[in-house]
Image: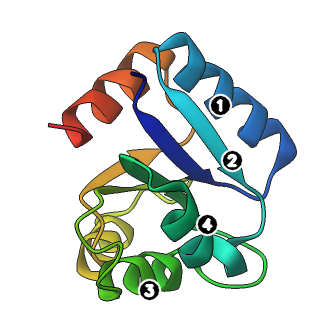
Amino acid sequence: MKKRIMLVEDDPSHRKLYASWLTIGGYEPRVIDDERGALAAAEAIGPDAIIVDIRLPNVSGLDVIETLKGAATTRAIPVMALTVLQSQHDMDACYAAGADAFVCKPDHIASFLDKVSDLLR
């Protein structure tokens, strides 16, 4: 059975790119385009991992991660922060919010899929 990966991403081109990479990697991507419903979506989907863009239009990706990690139903699901922000401060903020992994955009498919695989271990 394919591992389900929930992707929270507002940008249509990035949703398409990362969903296609996940499919190529043998995963079943579940794409969420509105971060305000991330917790409910995660509870309904039951993903094996969640990838959250940090720069979202309505709610910060950091807040999304904190919500997911704060809920009893989703706190054990590994979460990867996905962002164009590349400073040590940004990385530290993602880990402080509860992220289990951090990926800078743009990434290469092989590197991205390696990080997803590591996240699932």
Residue that carries the numbered disc 2 in the rendered image = 31
To which quarter of the image does residue 68 belong?
bottom left
In this view, the residue in front, 92 or 7, is: 7
Residue 79: x %, y % from top left: 35, 58
Q: What is the secondary structure assignment of the residue under circle 4?
A: helix
The answer to whether the residues at label 3 and label 1 have Cβ atoms under 8 Å apart is no
> What amino acid is labelled 4 in the image?
Ala
Which tag is nearer the camera, tag 4 or tag 2?
Answer: 4
Mark closest to the chain's N terminus, 3 or 4? 4
Identified at 77% across, 32% down, the residue is 16
**Disc 3 from disc 1: Cα separation:** 23 Å
| Label 2 crowd (10 A; few <14 / some 14-19 / many >=20) | some
Identified at 46% across, 45% down, the residue is 104
**Disc 3 from disc 4: Cα separation:** 12 Å
Residue that carries the numbered disc 1 in the rendered image = 19
> What amino acid is labelled 3 in the image?
Thr
Identified at 44% across, 50% down, the residue is 47
Quarter of the picture holding the C terminus:
top left
Q: Is residue 121 left or right of residue 70?
A: left
Which tag is nearer the camera, tag 3 or tag 4?
Answer: 4
**Disc 3 from disc 2: Cα separation:** 18 Å
To which quarter of the image does residue 103 belong?
top left
Residue 102: x %, y % from top left: 34, 52
In this view, the residue in front, 47 or 97, is: 47
Which tag is nearer the camera, tag 4 or tag 1?
Answer: 4
